[in-house]
Image: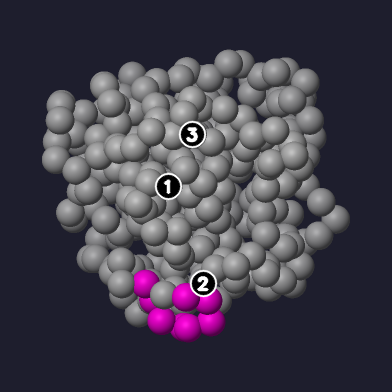
Amino acid sequence: MKGVWLLAGLAVGWNPGDAARAADEPLVLDVWPGKAVGDHGQIGPERVRAAAEAPTTDAKWITNVTRPTISVFRPGAEHNSRVAVVICPGGGYWNLAWDKEGEEVAAWLQTLGITGVVLKYRVPRRPGEPQRLPAPGPLLDAQRAIRLVRSRAGEWGIDPERIGIMGFSAGGHLAVMTAISFEKPAYEPIDAVDRTSCRPNFAVVAYPGYILTHPGSGVLADSIRIPKGTGPMFLVHASDDDEPGAQPEQSLALYRTLRGAGVPVELHIYDEGGHGFGVRRSRRSVSRWPEQCAEWLRHRGILPGPAGDRTGR
């Protein structure tokens, strides 16, 4: 495990002290006290896909998730910014890119003093759920995860008004839906945790899909409605992203809609990067997006720093 974290740390440009802290095992908690609310169907035991069947060879792909969890990666007490981010890995709602868009992202956030909370949400789609539409179960998991983190804010040294959500690809769509669905939670309260708000205070969305009705339409999906009180968003994409349903037009349309609704939003579209660049360092300029995101967090006043001249709440 420590070797994996050290490699991830080198990829995103942190120092050895940060890598040592990131090597600590995370706290893993069940999202639900029993069976996941709203789940159905039989999909077999959770597993990591073998290389021959994995979507790509550069990530650890998890599937058959029936027991959603959060893995909590906390920064050292001396570096704690009191900010937390729930991280939603991508995978088309079929799989989760667990290391590339989950654990490595949490490791980067730790270097900023942020508590990274990797959400293992239910995948794949359950029987009878249309392939062309987002799966419904993950939104329940994400809303519950936000509430769970907020309910533990005092225990974990987190400001309950600085809890965000971040997602990649399908996880980016999940982050958007979580950010805009707080007025009408997707499930009925089941315990004290659900007395806390499921509204993220901000969102970071990387190369999302499912934003448009279909690729090239320019028409937002019916589910994309921006309520008053939606937190600020940071969007990032690559011009050469040719993943079906996740082209840069998705982020462009989302940007225009958020701006029209009066939501503070920043959009970065890079010349090259393809799909699934995560937070890994490369020769391409897209690998600088984490630094720009960190600057945005400071500018919004979410992270402490010289650029923090506004509030992100």
Tell me, yes or no, whether the two marked residues, 1 and 3, touch with CB atoms within 8 Å.
no
* Residue toward you, 47 or 255: 47
- Name the residue rendered at 25%, 35% in the picture: 37
Determine which residue is flagged by label 1.
125
Determine which residue is flagged by label 2.
250
Question: What amino acid type should be assigned to the residue bearing mark 3?
Answer: Asn
Q: Earlier in the sequence, mark 1 or mark 3?
A: 3
Question: What amino acid type should be assigned to the residue bearing mark 2?
Answer: Gln
Q: Is residue 231 left or right of residue 292?
A: left
Residue 295 can be seen, yes or no = no
Span shown in magenta:
214-221
Q: Earlier in the sequence, mark 2 or mark 1?
A: 1
Q: Earlier in the sequence, mark 2 or mark 3?
A: 3
Helix, strand or loop at label 2? It is helix
- Name the residue rendered at 31%, 72% in the picture: 222
Q: CA distance from mark 1 to mark 3?
A: 9 Å
Tell me, yes or no, whether the two marked residues, 2 and 3, touch with CB atoms within 8 Å.
no
Check disc 3: other Cα within 10 Å, few if <14, some if 14-19, many if 20+.
many
Check disc 2: other Cα within 10 Å, few if <14, some if 14-19, many if 20+.
many
